[in-house]
Image: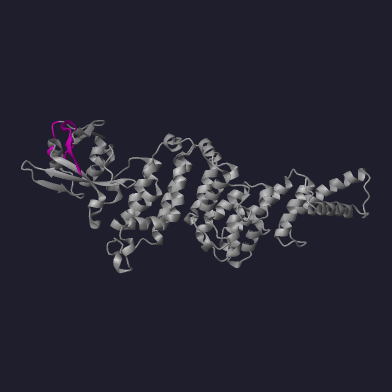
């Protein structure tokens, strides 16, 4: 532990009226707390108003903690260090007395500061017993490099050790400092290119999020006694008297993902985001991003079989933030994977497979579905996966369930319908291309005569275009089997449907 002698400048000293020094601080004057760490002075400049707010030893400690800028010692193998400041008074006889947080800062305290007899010690939190651990506001957070600060193995292992020593609630308190440290980075630091591959801090964040999939293994690796533990008697050395359970992994997901989302929204440069992912293999990016949203399915379309997704819909929030900050379209649109899915359908297929398996946390995924639907082309919305289904088909199946009425998926369905209707009316392609899309939608809804009932714009636009083509064919001398205009328009449509069925689409 290091010691710092602290001394207050007499000319700026603030005392109660009963013990006022000759010189009084006035508006704009500066209070100085001087000291030394290994012989180096520390000066803290305070206005008189700030000085008046130092009423307790806790206030004085926090003032000093905020102003310690030099790197502190870090335990090897840890991503960061957390220290607590202890104030010690040493009198002329070299007797020492520790000042406690609740003690007031009185004239005697200022006298000790003036004399240089008040020293502080920075102690690693692991040197304190659990019952003596301070709150996060009283701690000093320090790290040596960003690479280790975002290393999954180091970070999850250290979180485990903090939880073991002081409990999950205290660990969460400490990690607010970690989040604050990363969000306080400048935009230049966040967007700086680290290697020839064009990687930035954002790539490290993605590696961290992927590492959550191995959280349990990393926690076991951080516990030297893991192999010798037998439930329940072997957890007496844990503050919470138990192995960190699923709630601890929930905390890791919320902390790591929320920090990354905030970093993307607040600091990521759109051009840099484009460059990062444009330089990566598109299929790999899709694999990473889609997995964080929905997980990696074993193929049975059951949610319990997915791994790797961020919990609480945080993967959906992250993807929306990335898209808004420049994620290339090829990384989230189109289709991919063993089921030839679009991301929209990839999210909704498990929902339709197990309709009752909806959770409130899925609201973020529903929001992402709306976000994607508003950006997908008509071709993407009509895309059939290997099972012949389109995204709207899954939404319709789920929304037919009685328990769907109070879920956000009703809005998802309505937005997809509205988007498809609008895009059909604005479609610039040929009638053959429109018929091809209509056939995909019809097939997804069973192929019946009323399959397009929920999307009347298809029938309207196909009929209007077929009517125009009928006029063109008549001018070219085409002979129709039907005498009526409506019958002839139907013949035009039938011809186009047969042509598309034979693979003629242009």
In front here: 305 or 42?
305
Does residue 86 appear to the left or right of 349 in the view shown? left
Residue 17: say if magenta.
yes
The location of residue 22, given as percent across then percent down, is: 13, 31
**Residue 172 makes an appearance in the image:** no
486 or 441, which is in the foreground?
441
Where is residue 74, by image quadrant? top left
Image spot of residue 181 (x, y percent): 36, 42
- Residue 255 vs 201, above or below: the answer is below
Q: Which residue is drawn at the image coordinates 48% and 56% (left, top)? A: 312
Q: Is residue 67 left or right of residue 318?
A: left
Rendered position, 428 above or below 502: above
Q: Is residue 506 magenta?
A: no
For the image, the number of numbered tags is 0
Residue 36 sits in quarter: top left
- Residue 307 seen in the figure: yes
448 w.r.t. 26: above or below: below
Image point (12%, 42%), residue name? 108
25 vs 211, left or right, is: left
Which residue lies most toward the left here?
Answer: 93
Q: Position of residue 175 (x, y in %)?
A: 35, 50
Task: Please state, as top left, top right, bottom left or bottom right, where the N terminus lies in the image.
Answer: top left
In the rendered structure, which segment of residues is drawn in magenta?
1-22
Q: Residue at x 15, y 45 (%)?
A: 88
Percent position of residue 54, x then y: 23, 42
């Amino acid at each position: 532990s290091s010691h710092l002698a602290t001394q207050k400048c007499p000319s700026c000293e603030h005392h109660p009226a009963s013990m006022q020094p000759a010189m009084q601080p006035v508006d704009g004057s500066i209070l100085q707390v001087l000291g030394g760490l290994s012989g180096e002075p520390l000066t803290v400049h305070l206005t008189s108003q700030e000085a008046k707010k130092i009423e307790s030893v806790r206030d004085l400690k926090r003032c000093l903690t905020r102003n310690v800028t030099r790197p502190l010692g870090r335990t090897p193998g840890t991503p960061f260090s957390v220290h607590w400041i202890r104030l010690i008074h040493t009198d002329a006889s070299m007797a020492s007395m520790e000042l406690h947080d609740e003690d007031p800062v009185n004239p005697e305290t200022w006298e000790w500061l003036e004399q240089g007899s008040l020293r502080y010690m920075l102690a690693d939190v692991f040197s304190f017993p659990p019952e003596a651990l301070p709150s996060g506001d009283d701690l000093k957070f320090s790290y040596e490099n960003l690479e280790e600060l975002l290393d999954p193995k180091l970070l999850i292992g250290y979180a485990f050790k903090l939880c073991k020593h002081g409990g999950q609630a205290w660990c969460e308190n400490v990690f607010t400092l970690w989040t604050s440290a990363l969000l306080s980075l400048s935009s230049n630091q966040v967007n700086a290119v680290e290697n020839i591959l064009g990687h930035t801090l954002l790539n490290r964040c993605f590696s961290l999020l992927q590492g959550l999939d191995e959280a349990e293994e990393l926690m076991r690796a951080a516990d030297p006694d893991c192999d010798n533990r037998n439930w329940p008697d072997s957890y007496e050395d844990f503050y919470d008297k138990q192995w960190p359970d699923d709630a601890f992994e929930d905390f890791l997901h919320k902390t790591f993902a929320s920090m990354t989302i905030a970093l993307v929204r607040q600091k990521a440069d759109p051009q840099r985001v484009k460059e990062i992912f444009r330089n990566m293999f598109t299929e790999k990016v899709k694999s990473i991003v889609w997995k964080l949203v929905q997980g990696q399915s074993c193929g049975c379309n059951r949610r319990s079989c997915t791994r790797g997704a961020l919990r609480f819909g945080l993967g959906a929030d992250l993807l929306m933030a990335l898209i808004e900050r420049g994620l290339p379209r090829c990384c989230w649109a189109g289709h991919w994977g063993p089921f030839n899915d679009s991301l929209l359908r990839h999210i909704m297929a498990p929902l339709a497979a197990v309709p009752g398996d909806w959770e409130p946390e899925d609201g973020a995924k529903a929001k992402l579905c709306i976000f994607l639907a508003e950006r997908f082309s008509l071709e993407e919305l009509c895309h059939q996966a290997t099972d012949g289904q389109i995204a709207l088909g899954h939404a319709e199946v789920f929304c037919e369930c009685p328990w769907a009425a109070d879920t956000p998926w009703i809005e998802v369905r309505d937005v997809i319908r509205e988007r498809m209707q609008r895009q059909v009316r604005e479609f610039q392609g040929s009638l053959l291309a429109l018929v091809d899309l209509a056939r995909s939608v019809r097939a997804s809804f069973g192929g019946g005569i009323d399959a397009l009932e929920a999307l009347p714009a298809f029938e309207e636009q196909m009929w209007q275009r077929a009517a125009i083509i009928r006029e063109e064919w008549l001018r070219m001398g085409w002979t129709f089997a039907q005498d009526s205009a409506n019958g002839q328009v139907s013949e035009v449509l039938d011809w186009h449907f047969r042509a598309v069925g034979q693979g003629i689409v242009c």
